Image: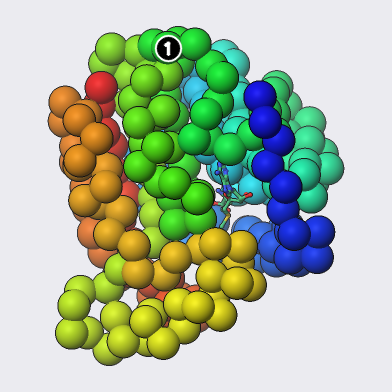
């Protein structure tokens, strides 16, 4: 498995930033996440767990595997997982190629990650590959605002500096279309506008895609 390298400074900055805003963002998203992640069980893979925003929801899983290429996230993630009693295995690779066996996991979850991965389509194909038949991909993602909206204009204005600071994060990606295009048997996607001070990422989707 190849280990992805992050920029040492921005990688650390992002780990620090996530740790700082984590509990606030989780409060904003609690209703969405607790509904979506209510039935997690068996083997669960989390793509890009960062510093552990979703550990609270993973306690019911038998086995949890985190796919996290940013080494700077790791110490905080491990500390928090231990504190919450989540037995987390971390794979320091990109989710484009996890190395996990085909049809081997019950759930794949990710929150605020598909905007940042280098190749979102490959990540989605890999997700479908590792899920068992009937397995579920659960996600919460920020996405492009509707064409012509003020928010969309703001996203386009900020996209380059944002991408640089947040290591590849794309403000105006049409993630819903990407998810629909990879051949899940069923997709339910809810699009909504969050009310938060992080205005550029307030347009979001949450949902489930079933293999
Ligand atoms: C904005 S953070 C979100 C972290 C966490 N999921 C949350 O909700 O707070 C994006 C995460 O995706 C990770 N990431 C970036 N590229 C990735 C890839 N190719 N595969 C898996 N994770 C990736 C980053 O290291 C980071 O932890």
What is the x, y in percent for residue 69? 67, 41
Q: Quadrant of the N terminus?
A: top right
Identify the image quadrant of residue 154.
Answer: bottom left
In this rendering, the answer to whether 150 lies above or below 118 is below
Q: Quadrant of the C terminus?
A: top left
What is the x, y in percent for residue 66? 62, 31
| Residue at image location 58% in from the left, 38% down from the top | 94
| Residue at image location 29% in from the left, 80% down from the top | 152
Q: Which one is in front, 168 or 193?
A: 168
Give left or right: position of 111 versus 161. Answer: left
Q: Which residue is mark 1?
A: 102
Identify the image quadrant of residue 148.
Answer: bottom left
In this rendering, the answer to whether 20 lies above or below 148 is above
Give left or right: position of 189 versus 101. Answer: left
What is the x, y in percent for residue 151? 31, 83
Give left or right: position of 153 versus 23. Answer: left
């Amino acid at each position: 498995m190849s280990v992805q390298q992050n920029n040492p400074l921005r990688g650390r900055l992002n780990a620090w930033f996530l740790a700082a805003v984590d509990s606030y963002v989780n409060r904003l998203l609690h209703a969405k996440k607790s509904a979506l992640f209510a039935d997690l069980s068996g083997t669960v893979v989390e793509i890009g767990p960062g510093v552990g925003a979703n550990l609270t929801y993973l306690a019911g899983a038998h086995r949890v595997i985190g796919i996290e290429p940013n080494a700077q996230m790791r110490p905080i993630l491990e500390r928090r997982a231990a504190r919450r009693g989540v037995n987390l295995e971390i794979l320091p690779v990109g989710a484009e190629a996890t190395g996990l066996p085909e049809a081997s996991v019950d759930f794949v979850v990710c929150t605020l990650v598909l905007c940042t991965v280098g190749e979102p389509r490959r990540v989605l194909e890999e997700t479908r590959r590792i899920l068992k038949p009937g397995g579920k991909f659960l996600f919460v993602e920020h996405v492009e605002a509707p064409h012509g909206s003020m928010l969309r204009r703001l996203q386009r204005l900020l996209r380059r500096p944002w991408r640089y600071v947040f290591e590849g994060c794309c403000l105006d990606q049409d993630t819903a279309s990407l998810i629909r295009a990879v051949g899940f048997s069923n997709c339910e996607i809810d699009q909504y506008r969050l009310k938060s001070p992080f205005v550029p990422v307030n347009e979001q989707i949450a949902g489930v895609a079933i293999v």
